[in-house]
Image (cartoon, rainbow, N blue to C red):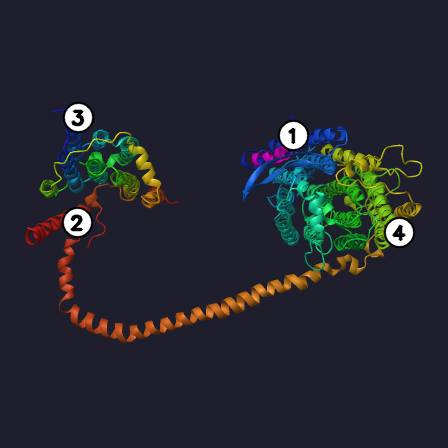
Amino acid sequence: MTAIQILFILSAVVILGAAVMVVSTKNLVHAALYLVAALFGVAVLFALLDATFLTVVQVVVYIGAIAILFIFAIMLTRREMRDQGEQLNRGWGAAALIGLLTFGGLFMLLSSWRGFNGTAAALPSGFDGVVELGAALVSTDAFVLPFEVASVLLLAALIGAVYVAGTKK
Amino acid sequence: MIPLSWYLILAAALFSVGLFGVLARKNAIAILLGIELMLNAVNINLVAFWRYGSLASIAGQVFAIIVFAVAAAEVAVGLGLVISIYRRRNTVVADELDLMKW
Amino acid sequence: MATETLIWLIPLPPVLAFFLIVLFTNRSKALSHTLGVGAAFLSWLGSMVVFYKAVTTEHFSGFASSIPWLPVGDTWFRIGISIDPLGAAVLFFVAWTIFMIFLYSVGYQNFGQPKGDHDRAGLPPHGATVTDEHGHKHMVLSVEPMYSRFFAFLGLFAFGMYTLVVSDNLLTLFVGWEIMGLCSYLLIGFWYGKPSARAAAIKAFMTTRIGDVFMLLGIAFLYQATGTLTFSEIFTEETLHVLATTPAFFGLSAAGAIAILLFVGTIGKSAQWPLHVWLPDAMEGPTPVSAMIHAATMVSAGVYAVLRMFPLLTAGWHEGAALLPAMNLVAFIGAFTALFSATIAVAQNDIKRVLAYSTISQLGFMIAALGIGAYIAAAFHLITHAFFKGLLFLGSGSVIHGMEHGVLHTGDHHVDPQDMFNMGGLRKKMPITFWTFLIGGFALSGFPIITAGFWSKDEILADAWANGHLTVFITLAVAAFLTAFYTMRQITLTFLGEPRTKEAEHAQETPWTMTVPLVVLAVFAAAYGWVGIPEHFPVLGGILPNWFHEFVGGSLLEHPEALEFSWAPLLTSLSVALGGLGLGYLVYRNVKSPAEDKLQIPALKNKWYFDEIYDFLFVKPSYWFAETFTYQWMDKGVIDGILHFFGKAAAWIGDTLRKYIDAWFINDIVADKLSHQWTVHPAARAVRKVQTGRIQQYMLTSIGVLFVVGVLVYYFFMA
């Protein structure tokens, strides 16, 4: 077992453990903090996959912005959730079953795929993923349209969120 | 070296845990947390397929970035809705938000 | 600092002041006017330094610097600054008048006075009640509610004028020109609560816009013909020669056509006939605005533009030759306007309106001078006129201000503080205003030797005489006579005799911020003429060198010759000035009311009915076209008619369908008879239980179904 594999297993354990805590802990603030831990684990995986830019974005956007947004929302609605003893609803058994079935189904499907145990080719020398990614995002032959649409989406979401959450006078 | 299967299994597990959270948590914010887990599972898959597939086609990473953008939009609007509902009905329990029933 | 750098910087302080006032200091009146006046002072200082350097430079031909600005094809469009002798002379008077007007505005807008009782933004201040130490209540002038805004606008205006003067090409000149157009709109409509001010602002904007469109056409034509808009590149002998020999249209050369198009812009801006109608109405603005627009800057800008374009106007012409068609047109417009508006001024009773028509008339003098090729005389008159007309306007503002004080004292608000027949005897109440106004008035009339107006006007007349333009000479001489006459009428009615109303008795001298500019401008109104005494003038000629002629003449490629002296124009100008003044005093010394005034002829009083004619010819048809033709016939009749037809047809179809299909078949037979009693209703009742409204339950169900379907598909089709 190589060091990289040990690193992977460690982060996988952190991710899955944190994810389970996210869906099971009674204290929502703790749930949000566990989410941060899980997201960090995913960032480590991105680094292992040589997606350097995504690693940074994962930390900056996901942990820096989205997770903080969650904590804000939890704080704003805190009084309500403390009263609730049970955090799972009545159908949680069925939900667990569905979850397990999903995992099983995915596992079956994937393991029957012939590329399941594929390995990665070494990065060619001089390969710069960030440059490739940047060029692809603004190239008219590649992804400039989705990129621009995403920015419009963000703007729309921004305005929508302000409109929905704002108090009407 | 890590085989692709490890990533895929991890992502599948993460996805299922997230799905369980979405289906089982009472609190609307917690449901959104579950959605985040699922989106991250998807992202792991996308990046892993890029790394283990053709490096020249950068689509995997681009998709991950689009997912980031969608996640940010979704969280902003979703939390806005939750806060708006909380302000009006004083609850964030998803089951109690059942105005749209028969 | 290099002079060129300094010239670049001159226009900037006022525009900075504009932004600072608008963005930050608009709540504080003191801070705003400090910024405004300070900026005007800085620009003034810069201008003076530049002027001093220009004057002290031996054989001065100009400062210039430019930067590439816009790539056009494979070259650059360059913008820059240039100050040639004409520019320096213009900069001198612009800087002085603008600075004085800023200072004057502090007093005119009643800084330091209490807030008015009922004042609101958009209306002139109505006065405030104060209680003195004895417990007596009385009314005093109140501060302008939009004081800061006024200084902001003035700043922007000053920016436009400085830009226009220092620019070295037609495009930036036009930019400054249009900025001033905007500011004049804003400032004329400053008291936007008054309907008359709103109408005047729109009128001024629309009228000058007509001229500006032609000017823009001229600029485009020029650029198309020469590929440049920079003065120094256009006014080379080769370019001018090419332009003068290229035919354009109506038998004009390209140079003539361009000059005429640009001149139409001047007609609008300098309020020449037939676009003169806006200027008298512009008197609705506060008085410093009148002075700013009607003396110091905007109307001068029009004449300045023609001066700048003089080589183009006269391309292919040399002194003594017959006038070119374009020059004939310019001379005609100028001379006609000079006489025409002088006749109107004679019958006006509003103190500012008299001055407004007088301004139009004097601008006509300059334009006429340019038309007959008297470049230096026109420039000279432009500058002396700016000083004395600025002085007269500020003086009239001071009179109005003093009268408003009287109106507040008596409390009778029906008395118009601008009507000269309500005044009289103000010389004792407002001595500084009186003496300075007298100097300005005499300069305007061309009182011999001691006033600047005499020298500049005399030079125009002498030029017309010497070059044999007898028609222009006679027209201008008659206009000059009328000028002296109405000026004396104004002075007599306003200041001499006894007060005709209680308000005039209680008029009061204005504060120092208003009188200081008056005194400064009065000095120039008297003394500026002495820099341009012709060499061959009897006795006085040659004592002082004819500096102006030498200096400003350096702007032209070919230095104009000094005129031979001749007695005829001098005697004419002496007799019309003194005769007009004398007659004005004799006729009006005992006139008490408008009824006794023999010259209140309806045609003159109503400005030769030009407003009515334009209303009939342009305004009414436009309204008719918009309201009756476009709106009633086209929009409501044709377009709405078609749409309504479709709407009605669709409604008819819908109604028919509803009646015979929906109501009868669906509702009666299908819904009521079939479903209600038999199937649909009970089935719906059973199925709706599924709709719990719980989102997670929906999700659970749908994923469960997905699984089942997935397994089935897998089992039956894939395996």
Which numbered disc, 4 or 2, marks the residue closer to the eye?
Answer: 2
Tell which circle, 1 or 2, labels the residue nearer the N-terminal end.
1
Query: Judging from the image, what secondary structure is the residue with disc 1 in?
Result: helix
Q: Chain of mark 3?
A: A
Q: Is residue B65 left or right of residue C150?
A: left
What segment carries the magenta color? Answer: C8-20
Q: Amino acid at mark 2?
A: Tyr
Q: Amino acid at mark 4?
A: Val
Q: Amino acid at mark 1?
A: Leu
Q: What predominant SS class does the magenta segment belong to?
A: helix
Mark 3 nearby-residue class (10 Å; few <14, some 14–19, many ≥20): few
- Callouts 4 and 1 close, C-beta under 8 Å: no
Query: Judging from the image, what secondary structure is the residue with disc 4 in?
Result: helix
Asked which quadrant contains residue C343, the reply is bottom right
Which numbered disc, 4 or 1, marks the residue closer to the eye?
Answer: 1
* Label 4 – label 1 distance at C-alpha: 53 Å
Residue ID for mark 1: C6
Q: Amino acid at mark 3?
A: Ile
Please state which of residues C214 and C199 is positioned toward the viewer in this rendering: C214
Residue C81 point in image, percent of width and height: 65, 36
Q: Chain of mark 2?
A: C
Q: Which mark is residue A4?
A: 3
Query: Judging from the image, what secondary structure is the residue with disc 2 in?
Result: helix
Which numbered disc, 2 or 3, marks the residue closer to the eye?
Answer: 3
* Label 2 – label 3 distance at C-alpha: 42 Å
Q: Is residue A161 left or right of residue C433?
A: left
Mark 4 nearby-residue class (10 Å; few <14, some 14–19, many ≥20): some
